Image (cartoon, rainbow, N blue to C red):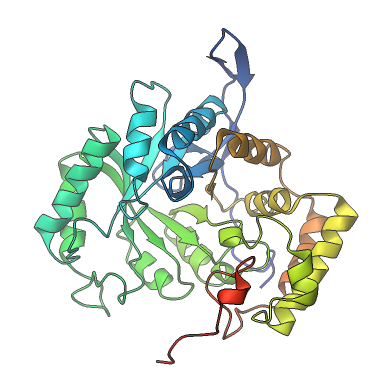
Amino acid sequence: MGRAEGTRRRATVKTAPERASTRPGGHTTVQGMKTRTLGRTGLQVSEIGLGGLFVSRVGATAEEGIRAVRKALELGITYVDTAPGYADSEEVLGRALKGVKTPLVLSTKLGGRPQPFLPRDRDCLMRSVEESLRLLGREVIDILMVHEPDRPGQYDWWTDWDEPSGPVLDLLEDLKRRRLIRFTGLGGTTAYELPRLMRTGRFDVVLTAFNYSLLWREAEREVLPAAVERDMGIIIGSPLQQGALARRYDDEIRGGAKWLSSPRRAQYLALYRLLDELSMSLPELALRFVLSNPQVSTVLTGARSAAEVEVNVAAVGKGPLPPELLARLDAIAAMVPFRPFEEPFGLPFGRGESYRGPGTAR
């Protein structure tokens, strides 16, 4: 499906007032950052957000992560997402945000903590919320999401899968009444299970990952339309497809990567030819592509360092892509409209020698 074929709506896009920030050494910078409305929440968030996974020990030392968070705030980023499942991300964020007065929208999730994690046990879920509040140093969580609500093999949330129900829904409503959280959301990775949960109308925002990027577009079919129907804020995760669009892999694409399907290989080669023509980096094209869609409220980037934050903010600052370029990208995406059956969930570029094909069929 091309971008013009899906349901469209005009997003509210504003430029945040320029503000002065004083850096160590007395230097002052003035930054402007465009913001968008996060659906029916009415919250204004920076159009680029910071994903919390890689400021944890997964991607950086605690000090590197803290510097990345503070650089993001300095450059005008006002939305940060994390989760209990992201190693020590909540703890790092709590340290980075201590004493910070900059307005910020912060989301975290339910899922994976404490261990053993019991997704249908209200007390277990409440302990997770209390720990998030403690680690983040907050009295209120802006957005609390249900993590992987669409993968019962990971977290079996629902007592009734056909008409989703379970203790987590009752807890979220109670937390809202008690003003411990402001809004609720879903953070998922499927293209067709997630929309069914979205259409219940119980959630304010959706974070969709792995299904909306330059070459992977299945979220256009049901996820984005379902969000528009319910006026949900739309957060795009993994715009660089967990590294597959973070850099070029010319040698592997041309002469290796035996696990790569022939349609995907041809698609990558077409994309690389376009990049050569444009003299543009792959990450810049990927980020600007996502934000060219006015339905999108914000896109998460997984920066590991302050330098990576700067690069991402600079790329987004160049604005949406022109319509003629979007049309060419649509044609390249249409070369592989659906994920090839054997394709690994995360493409193992740089480590393909250890990949031995799909797991058990079931």
Vertical arrangement, residue 68 with respect to residue 277, above or below = above
Front residue (pair 73, 43)? 73
x 73%, y 81%: residue: 263
Q: Quadrant of residue 269?
A: bottom right
Q: Residue 281: x percent and y percent?
A: 76, 50
Residue lying furthest left: 123
Vertical arrangement, residue 206 with respect to residue 12, above or below = below
Residue lying furthest front: 353
x 37%, y 44%: residue: 89
Report whether residue 332 is seen.
Answer: no
Report whether residue 353 is seen.
Answer: yes
Looking at the rendered image, the quarter that the N terminus falls into is bottom right
Front residue (pair 304, 9)? 304
Q: Residue 124: x percent and y percent?
A: 13, 57
Looking at the rendered image, the quarter that the C terminus falls into is bottom left
Q: Quadrant of residue 116?
A: bottom left
